[in-house]
Amino acid sequence: MSPNPTPHRRLGLAAGLLAALLTLATLRGPGLTIDEPLDVRPGRDYVALLQRAGWRFFERANVDALFRDNAEHPPLGRWLLGIASKALEPFEAWIFGPDPTGLYVLSGRVAPALAFAVLVGLIAAEAARRWGAAAGIASAWTLLVMPRVFGHAHLAALDTFLGLFWTLALLAAARAVDARRPLPVMLAAGVLWGLALLTKIHAWFLVPLILAWALIRLRPAKALGLVSAWGAVGVLVFVAGWPWLWYETFPRWGAFWGTGVVRASIRVEYFGRIWADRDVPWHYPWLYFAVTVPILLHVMGAVGVARGWRERREDPFPALLIASVLLFLLLFSMRVPVYDGERLFLLVFPAWAMLAGFGFAAAWRRWGAFRAGRAALVGLMLGQAYGAASMHPFGLSYYNLLVGGLPGAERLGLEPTYWGDAVDRLLLDELARRVEPGEVVALAPTLYPGQGVATTTAALVRRDVVIRDESAVPEADWILVSRRRAYWSPELVQRLADPSARRVASRGRQGVWLSGLWKFPRTQRPSPDASVRAVDRIDEDRRGSLVDPGPKNQERPTSRD
């Protein structure tokens, strides 16, 4: 470790700025995902109530009303989304036009994009501090060009926040244990762990990792004392930061823990079969970990694991990173609910990126002294960006060559897409160009009431069209289809098989369609008196001005007429 941390901080700052630039510049690409309205709306409600009520925000009546319908997750991530959505709403309305749903999800996406930039900078600085500049650069680059990680950084959801706060808490606690005066540093690390707890339930699993690390590095009595102090601070921050737990603390805390096990089952397509999330085979997380990262980055990670094992006595820190990865892969192998590919264990990839950087540093030390070796290593690492670049904005559909890319995954019966991001702005613009006023448009599949309304754009509302949920499939003139086949209803399958149905546009990558727009002939046109104008069908609290949403991207959906 270098005694002068300044170069490492500068490297971290540069890496973070690059990540911020690339992510913010491509933020509009993905379509609205399933969870984004469910996370942005509560955050906006938090901010609105705080602005309106001030200190009365914390009164029980307000707390109960505000958190009752969204207590399945702690509030920190939603606070960040709400702050970004509210603060940047005027700029989004000015540049792209007002959002008719009133959610301003695009503005909310800025928060996870910036969190991702901080995360990239964090692992760059920490890897460089421990192992040198080559490791820091390679760690940051590895995380930045992981297609699914980069894809999640564009989405107004909680997973990127969890990756940041988990990694921050892990690295801070590891450094605190080794500090010259560990107690004050450990207390500060406890605050960071509290922030991770306030993001998602996964953060509780940091306790066994930090306890084991402290017991390895310190005398047992001292280790237990420090970890107890760290844990007490973290729990205090967790409770203080979530007013829902201030009242009926123990029943509500118990109910929160129950959300991880008592919940509606989610269906998963895996090797051509539809599974309930608890019944998915044990190898599901291992396979998705293996096939959603470019292969050379996995090779570098494996070199880092081998080097870490070989040098474990001199530097045990890589073993902590390895343990943090294995913890969640093992956890999600144990018949707990697991779905959405890599999403539930997305937080392991920063540690894996650091291990890849550690492995790259070994290769650089061996071959970097030669011009040809340097050129080969740099070229190979730069080439790993191809997956993220070629798949954008559908990075969540990336598969590596272990399964033959996205076409191979399709043949194997793996999910081509799972979160609705392929029903993007370009496909919706194509629908707005073709649809006639008053025609019925359905989105399928939908996983909660109002998902179709949340997907409606200003261009559609100007055509007097609001997208309806999957229940409208039998009567729809148009159907927007996301290729999440585990949730395709028999009615949807029947309508798509109708010879009169035409797929007029689609979105996809590598020759695989991920979303499509189907047109059906109208057999009976409803009378004008029977239809309700689109602006009246949008909830009052989500209503906005209806103006041009801004210029279209030059890329067009694949047309089939």
Image: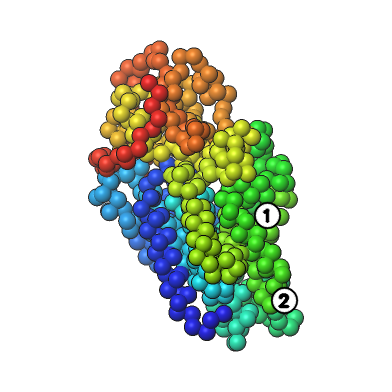
User: Which image quarter: residue 524?
Assistant: top left
Quadrant (top left, top right, bottom left, bottom right) of the N terminus? bottom right
Residue at 32%, 17% (x, y): give it.
Answer: 527
Question: Which mark identifies residue 496?
Answer: none
Residue at 57%, 61% (x, y): give it.
Answer: 353
Tally of marks: 2
The secondary element bearing badge 1 is classed as helix
Give the residue furthest to the right: 220
Please tell me whether residue 17 is drawn above or below residue 286 in the rendered image. below
Residue 507 is left or right of residue 525, and the answer is: right
Distance Cα–Cα, label 2 vs label 1: 25 Å
Callout 2 environment at 10 Å: few (<14), some (14 to 19), or many (20+)? few
User: Which image quarter: residue 277?
Assistant: top right
Q: Provide residue 492's location: percent of width, then percent of height.
A: 53, 24
Residue at 46%, 60% (x, y): give it.
Answer: 116
Residue type at tag 2: Arg
Question: Which mark identifies residue 329?
Answer: 1
2 and 1 marks in contact (CB < 8 Å): no
Residue 449 is left or right of residue 332, and the answer is: left
Sequence-earlier tag: 2 or 1? 2
Q: Provide residue 82's location: percent of width, then percent of height.
A: 40, 56
Residue at 68%, 54% (x, y): give it.
Answer: 329
Please tell me whether residue 245 is drawn above or below residue 317 in the rendered image. above
Quadrant (top left, top right, bottom left, bottom right) of the C terminus? top left
The reply to whether residue 280 is visible in this rendering is: yes
Q: Nearer the viewer, mark 2 or mark 1?
A: 2
Residue type at tag 1: Leu
Q: Which residue is mark 2?
A: 313
Callout 1 environment at 10 Å: few (<14), some (14 to 19), or many (20+)? many
Give the residue furthest to the top: 523
Q: Provide residue 115's location: percent of width, then percent of height.
A: 45, 61
The secondary element bearing badge 2 is classed as loop
